Structures are given as structure tokens and as C-alpha cells.
């Protein structure tokens, strides 16, 4: 064991000396010292060229041929066209009117429906029709008019179309019919406001063509207004009769009959 260790040490020492000689031949020690003592070289800074300001260019008229000297230059500027839209109508209806809603009683509503059905019975049977009582959602707020489903399936188009509503004076209003919802949307608001429809009114729709309704409006409070007008007319007639009798010198003991009294007496007979 001792002999083997001594042989190994000899061989190891011999290799170390050989490696030392090789390092001296290559001057590796000197190169290592030089690298430690010398400072690292700095890279040169790149010089940035200053930007020169652009010179303002003036527009010079293009030379044109003598043949086009008298003609105006052609402009190739794009002109933006406005999209084609339907003109919107302005209405005097305001949202504060919702606070002043008038709700019709059941009696007034039923009376208007009866008169509308009487009017419908006198229309031509060749043109289909229906009666639509007005509610608050039809004439205020949402302004949505739902139509009878069976009438829409039998007589109205199966897709969205514009349908014109023609009143008794012949004035037409274009409305948008929504086939999936079976009702009138755009345009109905203007028709309801223009014709001053209120809760309790009854409207008769008569389909005179595939895209046109003839509309008859039955006012819920029309009878009361007519009675007030008749009373005023009767009072004026009585005053005129008194003045005529006084001028003629006649003694009038009996007051003249008004229209209501005449009607009642005639009915009694």
C-alpha cells in the first residue's frame, strides 16, 4: 500500500511540473495580470443627427391646358350624403300630461262601444272591420295599439309593413305594422295625438285595401257635449221668442217648448 501511494505521488508531481511549463510557454500568467490591471473600454457614443424642420410648401396652381382655361377646375372631394330617413313629425304632447289623465267610467265606455258597433253594422260587408276601445296605454304613455289576433292572421300581411290610417276627413297617417306583435307602433302616436283620442273612445277600423284602414272615431264624451250645445241653442231660441213677442205686444202666458220637451211629448203620443 505504501509503495503504491509513493508511485502515485511521483506521477502527480510530474504532471504538475509539465502543466506549469506549458503555462509559462503560453504566458498565461502575464495575460491574467494584464486583464486584471487594464480598465474596460467604453463603447463610443452614437451621434444623433438633429432633425431639420420641414419647409412650408405653398400650393402652386397646376398648369392646365389652354383648352380648359375657361372651365372651372374639377373637385374630387368626397361629399357625404345624408341617410334617407322618414321625416319625423313634432307633436305638442308632453309627459306632464300623464298627470292629468282622464279615466272613463264603465258606463261611458260601454256606451261608446255600442255606438261604434252600430256604426260598424252599417258599413259595407265586403271590407272587413273591427271595433277597438281605447285605453290609457293606447292614447297616453306607451302609445301601443294591439290589434285582434284573428283579424291580423286573416287579413293583414305576414311581415312588417307600413299601413295608412285614413280618417273621416280623408287625411292619411302612415303607421308601422309589426306582424310578430300584431299591432301598430310607429305613427300611431301621432294619429292619437292629432285626433285627440282619450280613454273611453271607440275606434272602428275598416280595411279598405291590404295596406289602408278607414278609421271612424266614436267619442266617449260626445253625447254630453252635444247635450250642452242643444241646451245653449234652446236657451237662445227662448230668448229670441220672448223678444219677438214683446215687440209684437203679445202677452205670452206659456213658455215655449224646448227640443227635449217636444221629443218627450212626441214619444208619449
Image: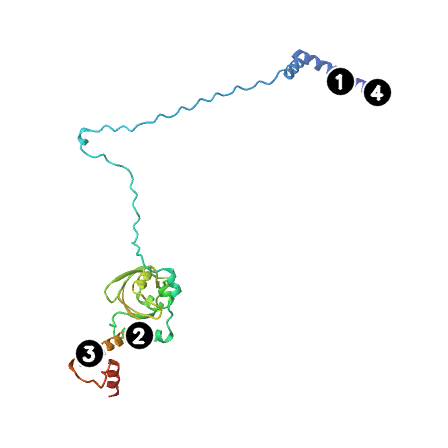
Residue 13, image quadrant? top right
Q: Residue at x 25, y 77 (%)?
A: 235
Question: Farthest bottom residue?
Answer: 269
Q: Which residue is mark 2?
A: 224
- Which residue is under mark 4? 2
Alpha-carbon span between mark 2 and mark 1: 135 Å
Instruction: Report the residue marked by disc 3.
Output: 243
Q: Is residue 55 left or right of residue 49?
A: left
Q: Residue furthest right?
A: 2
Q: Which residue is mark 1?
A: 12
In the picture, which quadrant includes the C terminus?
bottom left
Question: Residue 242 appears in which quarter of the rendering?
Answer: bottom left
Mark 4 or mark 3: whose residue is earlier in sequence: 4
Side of 82 relative to 237 (left or right): right
Q: Could you tell me which residue is drawn at 36 percent across and 65 percent down?
A: 138
Q: CA distance from mark 4 to mark 3?
A: 168 Å
The earlier-in-sequence mark between 2 and 4 is 4
Mark 2 element type:
helix
Amino acid at each position: 500500500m505504501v509503495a503504491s501511494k509513493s508511485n502515485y505521488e511521483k506521477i502527480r508531481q510530474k504532471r504538475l511540473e509539465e502543466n506549469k511549463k506549458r503555462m509559462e510557454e503560453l504566458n498565461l500568467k502575464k495575460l491574467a495580470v494584464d486583464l486584471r490591471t487594464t480598465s474596460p473600454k467604453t463603447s463610443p457614443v452614437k451621434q444623433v443627427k438633429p432633425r431639420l424642420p420641414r419647409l412650408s410648401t405653398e400650393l402652386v396652381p397646376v398648369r392646365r391646358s389652354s383648352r380648359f382655361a375657361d372651365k372651372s377646375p374639377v373637385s374630387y372631394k368626397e361629399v357625404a350624403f345624408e341617410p334617407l330617413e322618414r321625416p319625423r313629425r313634432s307633436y305638442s304632447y308632453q309627459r306632464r300630461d300623464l298627470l292629468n289623465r282622464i279615466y272613463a267610467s264603465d258606463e261611458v265606455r260601454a256606451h261608446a262601444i255600442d255606438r261604434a258597433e252600430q256604426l260598424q253594422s252599417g258599413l259595407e260587408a265586403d271590407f272587413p272591420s273591427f271595433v277597438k276601445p281605447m285605453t290609457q296605454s293606447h292614447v297616453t304613455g306607451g302609445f301601443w295599439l294591439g290589434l285582434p289576433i284573428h283579424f291580423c292572421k286573416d287579413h293583414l300581411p305576414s311581415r312588417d309593413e307600413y299601413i295608412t290610417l285614413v280618417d273621416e276627413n280623408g287625411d292619411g297617417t302612415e303607421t308601422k305594422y309589426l306582424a310578430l306583435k300584431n299591432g301598430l307602433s310607429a305613427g300611431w302616436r301621432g294619429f292619437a295625438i292629432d285626433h285627440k283620442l282619450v280613454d273611453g273612445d271607440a275606434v272602428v277600423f275598416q280595411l279598405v285595401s291590404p295596406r289602408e284602414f278607414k278609421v271612424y272615431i266614436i267619442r266617449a264624451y260626445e253625447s254630453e257635449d252635444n247635450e250642452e250645445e242643444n241646451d245653449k241653442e234652446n236657451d237662445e231660441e227662448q230668448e229670441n221668442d220672448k223678444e219677438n213677442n214683446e215687440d209684437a205686444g203679445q202677452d205670452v202666458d206659456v213658455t215655449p217648448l224646448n227640443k227635449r220637451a217636444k221629443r218627450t211629448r212626441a214619444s208619449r203620443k
